Image (cartoon, rainbow, N blue to C red):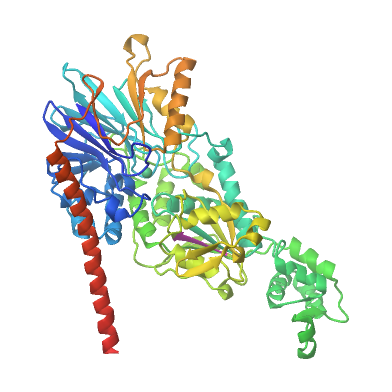
Amino acid sequence: MRFRFVGACGGSVTGSCTHFSYNRTNIQFLVDCGLIQGEGDESIVNSKPFPFRPSEIEFILLTHAHLDHCGLIPRLYKEGFTGKVICTTATARMAKISLTDSAKHLKDIYSENDVKKIRFECIDQRKEFGLSRLLPIHTDLFASFSRTAHILGSATITVSWINDADEKASVVMSGDLGNNTKENPYQPLLASRQGVFGYPDAIVVESTYGAGVRDSECSDYDARLSALHKVIQDEVFNKKSLLIIPAFSIQRTQELLVDIYCVFNQFYSTNDSIQSPIHIINQFYDEFESGCWGFIVQKSLKNAIDKLPINEQEKWLKSIKQIDEVNKAESKSNFSLSENAEISIADIKKLITSTTNSYPIDIKLDSGLAREMSTVYHEELCRPQIKKPEETLYRNRKMASRLGVEDGVQVDEFIKSIFPNNSTTDIEIPLGEHKIQYVTTPKTPRVAELQERGGILITGGGMCNGGPVVSHIEKVIDAKRNSTILLTGYMAKNSVGEKLMKHSQATPKEIEASTESWVLGSKEVLQKNITTNIIQLQGFYSGHADQSGLLDFIFEIVGEQKQETQTKPSAVFINHGQPKARAELKDAIEARLNSGNEGDRNPNEIYLPDSRQQWYDFNSKKWIAPVPNTRTEDLLQDLLSEQLKTNVLLQRLVDQLASNKYANNNIKKK
Ligand SMILES: [Zn+2]
């Protein structure tokens, strides 16, 4: 057996693809076949010829549904691949949704029709399936799937084969590793990631966050929930702001919905629990100081008075008068104390701060793609294990206690209601007096709709470059209204999300002096005119294990006895990380090796594979120098590469001409 790294190597993070060649049965297969993202013109970088013939690939093992792992599979079918894609049911379903959506943006590379050609084999539906259990995939070839807690359905895939000495050999392909562990499953939805069994010949490990160790606070369930509670209390209840949360459609949206549910369930769902005192830290509160106030404050004050015993209400109502038209121009307000008022401004303030005034908050989700993904969570987060039907395959065991329900049956019910199985109609899920609304048309709530309360809008377009979030940001970013953007995800370089992140870290002086202007959707905004408050909670929601998690994955031996006689060194290949992350993870592996931790696995070689696509041979445990191409082969390859690029550009030209013609025809008609 030999393998080579086709993508996500040489310091790049996206385009995961590993090419295997099995000499015993003379077959080739892939683990993942992902899209290259954020490295120039997406259509052009992704139309480079594959370094193999797609028709000669027997099958693909797919770790998870993110596009940087599955995004080029339709192109493989388009170019002659006819095999199966073997993965979990959740991965198959979400990959299909994702790829159908991406076909719209990558028209030059593949079509929706190519997506329809994909033949998935859902391994977790085989009768003999069990987590980490090796199952036959092909002659003398086996694979096991273990949980990684990265996204729903994501897996570490161990490939096992018979080597030239007729012994079993194996390599562990980590896929993307998440954060939940058995000891600390702090993220909301998924059960802990599983470790590596025994002594594989090699471990290929991702290194997205290989360079650092996260603050312990970020890995704490209560800390995350209280951070989110604070944002909701400050922004939504106190400032009555529209809280916009851009979120990725897979995993982040679902995690946020459950976290927000838990915050509301815990703090805002019953009448006697703590509700928001009206306007304490609100700009309107100051209006009382002047002795006159406007309609909004009056409405809140009236609400507070309505809650007093009937016999006291009259005294209050008589003490407040509406300012007449003549004096209104001067005071610019509508209400003040009347001449014979039996109460003072201090009394009003006291009433307002002491009255708990609850008001319903709308929590809206308007991302169509996230809704479609949620229909997969509806089923798959409840999927039982075939061999242990009393346990679910992916679900965090802590969910019941965190939701305050009794058992798994009630968690099932909760999941089925919060992740509806229908993505085409408007749905309302009551949450105490508040409600979660799945809406089908994205619409930014107007100020008038929110006057008496704040609102929460979870929306599509995690990095704020596309999706419904763009139109929301456009409307609020420099508007005279209270709005807040909460960032919870990874922001790629030069994305709008990254700009917002930097803005939130700038000092008021820097912002005042800024001459920078940003293009947001169809609008150009000066940085100093931004009125939106930007808050970051990224650390709490990261989907990737940090350095210490990666080290545990590499070194900790799960299962088998740890007797010395059995130990066998493993080669470690670090991929899927930027140069700094890979180098620092390598240093950290060496440091842990030198510390001689008892019971640790023993990595004897550590490689940072580059993009030259050399083969690594598992029999000789050596890299094989590539056979140099002949001049003719080089020329042919260059020609093919240029041809594919030309195809993309020609297709664009045809589309452009067609749309011009359409526009011209329309003008003529008018
Ligand atoms: Zn991923």
Image coords of residue 458 (percent x, y): 48, 59
First to last magenta residue range: 455-459
The verdict on residue 444 being magenta is no
Q: Quadrant of residue 482?
A: bottom right
Residue 542, above or below 182: below
- Res 501 seen here: yes
Image coords of residue 517 (percent x, y): 54, 64
Q: Answer left or right for 597 relative to 610.
A: right
- Res 597 seen here: no
Image coords of residue 132 (percent x, y): 30, 30
What's the magenta bit mostly, secondary-structure-wise? strand
Task: From the viewer's side, name the closer residue of 384 and 251.
Answer: 251
Q: Residue at x 59, y 54 (%)?
A: 504
Q: Quadrant of residue 173?
A: top left
Task: From the viewer's side, name the closer residue of 196 and 526.
Answer: 526
The quarter of the rendered structure image containing the N terminus is: top left
